Image (cartoon, helix red, strand yellow):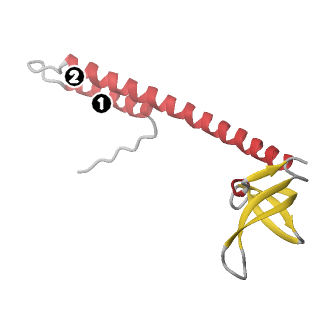
Amino acid sequence: MSTTISTNSASDLQMQYMNLLVTQLKNQNPLDPLDNNEMTAQLAQFSSLEQLESVNSQLESANTTFSDVMAVTNRNYANSLIGRDVTFFAEDEESGTTVEKVGTVESAYYNPSTGENLLGVSVDGEDYSLSLDAVVLIENQ
């Protein structure tokens, strides 16, 4: 007969281990008792696992906070470029070569499908949508 135990966290696993340990102690052979060192080592491993889960949870929370701060910072940076001239590279449709373009940032917006902050840049009546990474030079006005 096969038994599957599903656990969600180290504390659940530790509780199941304690129940198993108590059952073993109740039913152990008095002439061949359980090894105390082995039980202590197993309990220490469960404690370490529980602490690691706690650290992992805290790191995930910090990562989420950092990502949120970076998103706001990038939006603010994109907004600060409105009205400024930027240089970027684009593919020339006729020749297929990469050419340098200089244009004025007309807008800054967020694309929710890609998670990127983008710039709307106008070059001689032609509109381009650029990621912040595509800008190679920002000119003061």
In space, the residues marked 1 and 2 are separated at their CA atoms by 14 Å
- Residue at 80% in and 67% down: 128
- Left/right placement of residue 104 relative to residue 27 reads right
In the foreground, 31 or 121: 121
At 39% from the left and 34% from the top, the residue drawn is 13
Give the image quarter of residue 108. bottom right
Front position in the image: 117 or 134: 134
Residue designated by label 1: 20
Residue 8 % position (x, y): 46, 40
In the displayed structure, does residue 101 sit left or right of residue 23?
A: right
Q: Name the foreground residue: 139 vs 64.
A: 139
Amino acid on which the number 1 mark rests in the picture: Leu
User: Depth check: 48 or 64 in front?
Assistant: 64
Relative image position of residue 133 (x, y in whole percent): 69, 54
Residue 66 vertical placement versus 139 (above, below) = above
For label 2, the residue is 38
Q: Is disc 1 placed on a helix, strand or loop?
A: helix
The total number of labels drawn is 2
Q: Which amino acid, by three-letter code, is at mark 2?
A: Glu
Residue 24 in picture, x, y percent from top left: 23, 27
The residue sitting at 54% across, 34% down in the picture is 57
Name the secondary structure under disc 2. helix
